[in-house]
């Protein structure tokens, strides 16, 4: 009998490491893998200043091609010090923008450390990374299929793109899980989306609220959003 040949090389995928292959096949596992690395990084290190912290972080995540860069906005959008994130397909780099408040999340010499600040950082990091990981995964698949990325002209067009719907669906599911909601609870909320109490729950998640504000609940965009949400719920 002819031996089955692997679709992907054992040690490389699209010129990348096996961790990138894990990202394509199991994005949730990949995000958890990076999350565990950040926890290990936090536990093992004490830094002298912000430059020491960022240089160490970027060096630590160099194989994953994740880079932290200083935001040009002085005020933090989140308590964690993280501002936003973006994936750059040509360089295959996920860039996470931060402000000086990121110092509160890590152990600094001469500074009292509060682990709750790191937990806020970890939650925001996981959300940003998860969203951009889906885009990275999509980009890899586009390279395989020789598909060019689409552009965005306005907010509604941006949120209606299939790639964005897929990414935000993953983000919505992760937000539910972050607050300890199991799969049955999420499905109940989705199936009862017209009920007033559940609309309040939906509005609690900013991305979900954005979709409800931009699109009719019976639109094709919302149907696709729900389709992907259910797929991510059932993808164990």
Image (cartoon, grey):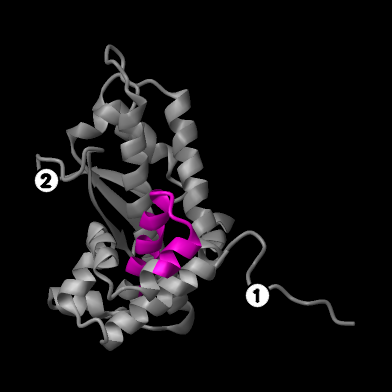
Residue that carries the numbered disc 2 in the rendered image: 72
Residue 86: image x %, image y %? 27, 58
When asked about the image quadrant of residue 200, the answer is bottom left
Residue 111 position (above or below residue 6): above
| Residue 181 lies in the magenta-colored region | yes
Q: Report helix, strand or loop for mark 2.
A: loop
Q: Residues within 10 Å of mark 1 (few under 14, many from 20)?
A: few
Residue 153 drawn at (x, y percent): 13, 78
Q: Residue at x 40, y 71 (%)?
A: 139
* Percent of width and height locating residue 68: 29, 44
| Towards the viewer: 226 or 111 | 226
Q: Nearer the viewer, residue 167 or 189?
A: 189
Q: Is residue 20 left or right of residue 159?
A: right
Do we see residue 227 in this rendering? yes
Q: Is residue 226 above or below residue 81?
A: below
Q: Quadrant of the C terminus?
A: bottom right
- Range of magenta residues: 166-188
Name the residue carrying label 1: 7
């Amino acid at each position: 009998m002819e031996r089955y040949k692997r679709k992907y090389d054992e040690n490389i995928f699209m010129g990348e490491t096996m961790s990138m292959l894990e990202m394509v096949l199991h994005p949730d596992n990949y995000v958890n893998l990076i999350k565990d690395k950040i926890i290990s990084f936090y536990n093992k290190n004490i830094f002298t200043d912000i430059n020491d912290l960022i240089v160490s972080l970027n060096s630590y995540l160099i194989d994953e091609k994740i880079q932290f860069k200083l935001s040009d906005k002085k005020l933090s959008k989140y308590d964690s010090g993280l501002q936003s994130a973006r994936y750059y397909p040509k360089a295959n780099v996920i860039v996470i923008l931060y402000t000086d408040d990121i110092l509160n999340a890590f152990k600094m010499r001469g500074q009292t450390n509060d682990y709750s600040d790191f937990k806020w950082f970890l939650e925001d990091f996981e959300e940003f990374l998860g969203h951009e990981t889906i885009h990275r995964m999509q980009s890899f698949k586009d390279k395989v299929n020789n598909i060019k990325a689409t552009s965005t002209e306005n907010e509604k067009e941006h949120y209606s793109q299939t790639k964005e719907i897929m990414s935000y669906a993953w983000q919505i599911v992760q937000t539910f899980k972050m607050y300890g909601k199991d799969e049955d609870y999420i499905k109940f909320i989705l199936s009862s989306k017209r009920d007033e109490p559940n609309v309040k729950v939906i509005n609690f998640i900013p991305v979900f609220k954005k979709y409800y504000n931009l699109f009719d609940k019976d639109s094709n965009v919302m149907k696709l959003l729900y389709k992907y949400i259910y797929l991510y719920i059932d993808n164990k």
